[in-house]
Amino acid sequence: MQPRFSVLLLVSAIAAATPADAQRPKLGLGIGGGAILGSQLLEHEFVGRIDGLDIPVRREVNLEDVAVLSANAEWYIVPNVALRLHGAWGTGRLQVVTDAIVNDQDIQFEFESDFGDVRVSVYDVGLSIWPWAPGTAGFAPFITFGIGRFAYDFDAETGDGLFRAVGRRSERAWLLGLGADLHVWRTVTLRVEAMDHIVDSPLDPADFDSSVIPVRTSAFTEEVNNVRLTIGAHIYFPLDSYSTTDAP
């Protein structure tokens, strides 16, 4: 009798604690901070002349140490699909790496120099998809894809005058990302995400002294991956109800 009574009590408690409907989010707002991982904006090889010798030289132009602040707003079309507007702003540095090979040996003539700050701004629109409605479970992973603009504001010049990038450059960006929402309290979640903004190189031949360093045209057609890692707080506004049969 006692075991049967205990089981009945447990079932009754679960039934009382489980609502028939759950509050699903219709709107969401979030803010976060993070960094853009080092992005290689351009890589090209050329032959330089040193002490009468023709020496193969490789030069990279990299975006480094970009700290970003990001904000986003979401409208949930259905419980687990949201239309997302996003913006991010940050500042980093432009790094030019040059190395050379002499007598078929890499002698590590490598120079890593900072040549001015780079300000970046990102604006995009996309869709985020969860396997179940966020807010109905403590953990909710999601994927995001979309399109936007990624802008660089350069103020950089090498000491040798062979490279100079100044001014604002804006490129179309394809967005692809992964993330997860971790429930913290009521409608507040901790959001962690990694987003890749895929753009064409923002540099062009005019940024280089072609009389000294010719740059092959194909170098400017290669894609640039700007991977943004952020962590922040996200607030849901559960303004509607739906059945929880799809929740895990």
Image (spheres, grey):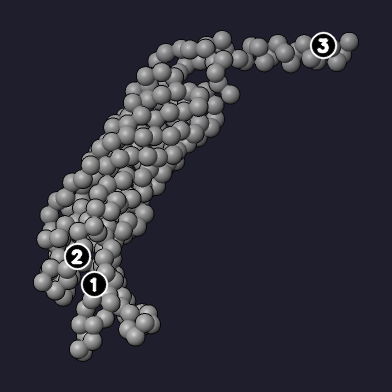
Q: What x and y, as percent, mark residue 179?
A: 45, 38
Task: Tell me which numbered mark, 3 or 1, is placed earlier along the sequence.
Answer: 3
Q: CA distance from mark 3 to mark 1?
A: 83 Å
Pointers 1 and 2 in contact (C-beta within 8 Å): yes
Q: Which residue is mark 3?
A: 5
Pointers 2 and 3 in contact (C-beta within 8 Å): no
Amino acid on which disc 1 is placed: Phe
Amino acid on which disc 3 is placed: Phe
Quadrant hosting residue 85: top left
Where 7 falls versus 75 (above or below)?
above
Amino acid on which disc 2 is placed: Val
Q: What x and y, as percent, mark residue 182?
A: 50, 35
Q: Nearer the viewer, mark 2 or mark 3?
A: 2
Quadrant hosting residue 28: top left
Q: Residue at x 10, y 72 (%)?
A: 211
> Could you tell whether 40 is left or right of 21 in the image?
left
Q: What x and y, as percent, mark residue 180?
A: 47, 36
Q: Residue at x 56, y 10 (%)?
A: 20
Where 232 falls versus 99 (above or below)?
above
Task: Tell me which numbered mark, 1 or 2, is placed earlier along the sequence.
Answer: 1
Q: Nearer the viewer, mark 3 or mark 1?
A: 1
Q: Is residue 183 visible?
A: no
Q: Residue at x 32, y 31 (%)?
A: 126
Quadrant hosting residue 174: top left
Q: Which mark is residue 46?
A: 1
Q: Which residue is mark 2?
A: 215
